[in-house]
Image (tube, rainbow, N blue to C red):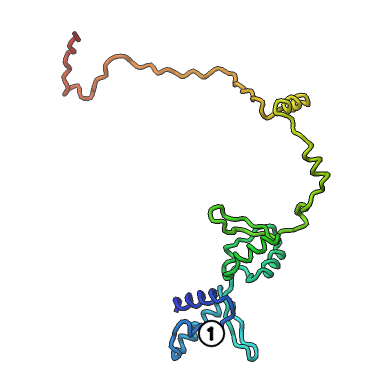
Amino acid sequence: MMTQVVYAVEYLKDKDRPITFDDIFKYLSIPPDRKEEARRLRSALMNHPKVEFKPREGKQEATFRFRPVHNVRSADELRAFLQRQPTAAGISVKELKDGWPGAVAAIDMLEKEGTLLVTRNKKDNVPKLVWPNDPSLGLPVRIDDDFQQYWHKVKLPDSADLRQELEKAGLTPTSQVKEVIKVSGAREKKRRINRKAGRSTNTHMSHILKEYPMKASK
């Protein structure tokens, strides 16, 4: 039964639309005479956290639909969803793809329109996080010609002249060699361990070992 539930949830996820229980039952190829199995499967799907159940209304049959992490299935719903966010945290594209097969295509389109800000993986350029883009915070597309000419007329001084100007103003250039401060103080002398000269003997084995006189070296 639990295996059938898993297959049913995957089926709902792939279809991405409301599905009647009869269609789910036919997809699972369960014989129609197994009424008890059908009852248990229906109850399991109605209470499944990844399934959205809509009861029967009038002539409209009851339906089941996959419940994604975020209830977003179109570009317009994504815009509205991002506008409702209480914080400026980015929304994971992986979560948006859960139940929305066309998420990446819609994100690419909204990014080109300037509606979204998108970060992508460097390896495969797949979108990773999205934010709403406020056009009023962007720079103007057209910059006045007078300002452009004034900008290009401003020339930066050479590095040597720039350093002199900074020093005259009492500022420290970043290219200046930093002075190494030496810490004064005598080093602590290490205590020498006096080692007793002479030959050590195994006193506890003196009754067993026999000492031999050492021959003088030639």
What residue appears at the point 81 percent right and 46 percent down from the top-left corner? Answer: 145
Judging depth in this view, the residue of 91 and 140 nearest the camera is 140
- Number of numbered labels in the structure image: 1
Judging depth in this view, the residue of 18 and 214 nearest the camera is 18
**Three-letter code, disc 1:** Phe
- According to the picture, the residue beneath numbered tag 1 turns out to be 21
Q: Secondary structure at mark 1?
A: helix
Residue 99 in the image, given as x and y percentages of width and height: 57, 71
What residue appears at the point 46 percent right and 88 percent down from the top-left corner? Answer: 36
Rendered-image quadrant of the C terminus: top left
Rendered-image quadrant of the N terminus: bottom left
Toward which corner of the image does residue 159 lie, by quadrant?
Answer: top right
Residue 82 in the image, given as x and y percentages of width and height: 69, 64
Q: Residue furthest right?
A: 146
Mark 1, residues whose alpha carbon is within 10 Å: few (<14), some, or many (≥20)? Answer: some
Residue 64 in the image, given as x and y percentages of width and height: 57, 80
Toward which corner of the image does residue 135 lie, by quadrant?
Answer: bottom right
Residue 204 in the image, given as x and y percentages of width and height: 23, 24
Q: Above or below — where is 5 with respect to 177?
A: below
Q: Above or below — where is 56 with respect to 91?
A: below
Q: Above or below — where is 203 with respect to 72?
A: above
What residue appears at the point 17 percent right and 11 percent down from the top-left corner? Answer: 215
